[in-house]
Image (cartoon, rainbow, N blue to C red):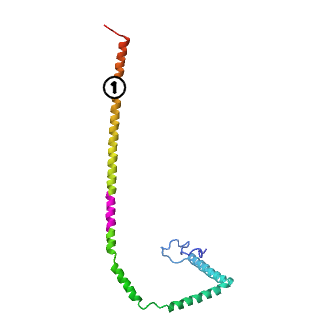
């Protein structure tokens, strides 16, 4: 079965699945090549049949040929200015005089310095951020410790006050005036 005109035949057949392997052609290779050749011939014949069914194609082709001949004639009559080479040499000299390579190098170096400065700032920012996080952790720990101390102190003070209230209640309930 031919692959043309849907795609170009790559030469692979059932007996030749890898084109990197060198081997003599087989009968299957011969049949595949014949099928592709026949497909090409049928395609070409169908194109010539189309020309017969399209009567205006001949006039269109002849018109295009005339246009191409006219265009070729106009192009042959074109004559570049005599001093074109001189003008091109002057333009080339002016371009050489402009020579912006120095400015380009300066700009390139400036961009490199800016990039390096940006890297330094980025590193500084990361270090600063890490330090702020560390300081916040320390502050959080200190606040937590202070609250823990205050809570313990309050519990201790509450326990002491409850003890004093119990003693006072004892005295009030059993007043021993002796």
Which residue is at a point 31% across and 60% down the rendered structure image? 117
In the current view of this chain or complex, which residue is farthest to the top? Answer: 178
Q: Quadrant of residue 65?
A: bottom right
Camera-side residue: 154 or 51?
154
Number of residues whose C-alpha sits closer than 10 Å to that of mark 1, classed few (under 14), some (14–19) or many (20 or more): few
Q: Position of residue 2 (x, y in %)?
A: 60, 75
Q: Which residues, given as a range, are shown in magenta? A: 109-120
* Residue 3, horizontal then vertical, whole percent: 59, 74
Tell me which secondary structure the magenta stretch mostly adopts. Answer: helix
Location of residue 131 with respect to 75 vertically, above or below: above
The answer to if 118 sits in the magenta stretch is yes
Among the 4 quarters of the image, the one containing residue 176: top left
For the N terminus, the image quarter is bottom right
- 143 relative to 19 in the view: left or right: left
Residue 39 belongs to magenta span: no
Q: Residue at x 31, y 64 (%)?
A: 113
Residue 49, given in percent of the width and then of the height, sits at 66, 83
Q: Name the image quarter holding the C terminus.
A: top left
Closer to the camera in the image, 108 or 4: 108
Secondary structure beneath dot 1 equals helix
Whether 109 is drawn above or below 95: the answer is above
Residue for badge 1: 157
């Amino acid at each position: 079965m031919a692959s043309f005109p849907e795609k170009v035949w790559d030469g692979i057949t059932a007996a030749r699945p890898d084109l990197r392997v060198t081997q003599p052609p087989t009968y299957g290779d011969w049949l595949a090549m014949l099928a592709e050749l026949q497909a090409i011939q049928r395609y070409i014949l169908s194109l010539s049949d189309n020309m017969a069914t399209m009567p205006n194609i001949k006039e269109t082709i002849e018109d295009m040929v005339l246009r191409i001949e006219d265009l070729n004639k106009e192009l042959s009559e074109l004559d570049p200015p005599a001093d074109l080479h001189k003008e091109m040499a002057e333009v080339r000299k002016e371009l050489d005089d402009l020579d912006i390579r120095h400015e380009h190098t300066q700009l390139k170096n400036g961009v490199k310095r800016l990039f390096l400065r940006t890297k330094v700032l980025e590193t500084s920012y990361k270090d600063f951020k890490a330090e702020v996080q560390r300081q916040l952790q320390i502050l959080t720990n200190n606040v937590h410790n202070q609250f823990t101390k205050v809570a313990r102190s309050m519990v201790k003070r509450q326990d002491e006050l409850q003890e004093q209230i119990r003693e006072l209640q004892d005295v009030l309930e059993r007043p021993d005036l002796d």
